[in-house]
């Protein structure tokens, strides 16, 4: 098990140069898998990422309105997941103030991943059933990387869910 924190996170400019993202974990150059947190402080167009499947969820703020290939979508509820293809044209409008979002990006030619939220209304034990399982705890700003059969116990009873990401690389 590997615990990653702010000392290992890396701040990077957005592909379009209009903001910054904090990479929590990445595989490959250019990446085939990336977990990051971004601050959205202005309206704009998302960068295109061909072959990349994207998952966003709102961590802080009142959220954003997205137009994904001309279909409207709202990301206004904290920890709500939204999925879309990096191949699609995406425009973003802030609902009011800047917000922060959690991003998972994976090259579908490399593999796939599933993101779920784990409520913490009681102690939780998470066991990795495959390699490359990640757990993000926003209350601590920590990311754990678990390999197959490794487990971790979360005992705090708080209102902020854990973000569980299970990757499935192609062989």
Image (tube, rainbow, N blue to C red):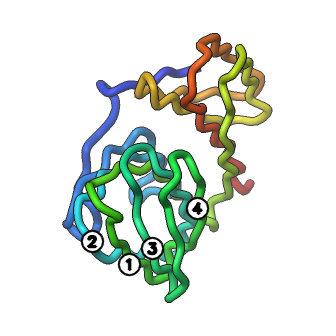
Residue under the image location 59 percent in, 13 percent down: 156
Q: Position of residue 131 (x, y in %)?
A: 70, 35
Q: Is residue 132 visible?
A: no
Q: Earlier in the sequence, mark 2 or mark 1?
A: 2
Residue ID for mark 3: 66
Q: Residues within 10 Å of mark 3 (few under 14, many from 20)?
A: many
Q: Are marks 4 and 2 in contact (CB under 8 Å)?
A: no
Residue under the image location 67 percent in, 13 percent down: 153
Residue ID for mark 1: 91
Q: Earlier in the sequence, mark 1 or mark 3?
A: 3
Q: Is residue 92 above or below residue 153?
A: below
Residue under the image location 32 percent in, 77 percent down: 45
Could you say which is closer to the camera, residue 28 or residue 18? 18
Dot 1 lies on which element? strand
Q: Position of residue 155 (x, y in %)?
A: 64, 11
Q: Residues within 10 Å of mark 2 (few under 14, many from 20)?
A: some
The furthest residue to the top: 155
Q: Are marks 4 and 3 in contact (CB under 8 Å)?
A: yes
Residue under the image location 47 percent in, 52 percent down: 103
Q: Earlier in the sequence, mark 4 or mark 2?
A: 2
Q: Are marks 1 and 3 in contact (CB under 8 Å)?
A: yes
Q: Residues within 10 Å of mark 1 (few under 14, many from 20)?
A: some
Q: Are marks 2 and 1 in contact (CB under 8 Å)?
A: yes
Q: Earlier in the sequence, mark 3 or mark 2?
A: 2
Residue ID for mark 4: 82
Q: Earlier in the sequence, mark 4 or mark 1?
A: 4
Q: Are marks 4 and 1 in contact (CB under 8 Å)?
A: no
Q: Which numbered circle lies on residue 43? A: 2
């Amino acid at each position: 098990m590997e615990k990653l924190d702010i000392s290992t996170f890396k701040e990077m400019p957005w592909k379009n140069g209009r903001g910054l993202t904090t990479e929590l974990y990445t595989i490959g150059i250019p990446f085939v898998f990336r977990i990051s947190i971004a601050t959205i402080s202005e309206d704009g167009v998302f960068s295109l990422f061909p072959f990349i499947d994207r998952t966003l969820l709102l961590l802080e703020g009142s959220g954003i309105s997205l137009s994904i290939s001309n279909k409207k979508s709202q990301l206004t509820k904290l920890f709500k997941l939204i999925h879309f293809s990096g191949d699609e044209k995406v425009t973003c409008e802030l609902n009011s103030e800047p917000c922060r979002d959690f991003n998972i990006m994976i090259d579908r030619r490399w593999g796939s991943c599933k993101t779920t939220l784990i409520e913490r209304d009681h102690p939780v034990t998470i066991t990795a059933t495959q390699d490359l399982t990640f757990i993000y705890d926003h209350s601590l700003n920590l990311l754990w990387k678990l390999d197959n059969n490794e487990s971790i116990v979360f005992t705090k009873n708080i209102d902020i869910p854990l973000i569980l990401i299970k990757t499935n690389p192609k062989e």
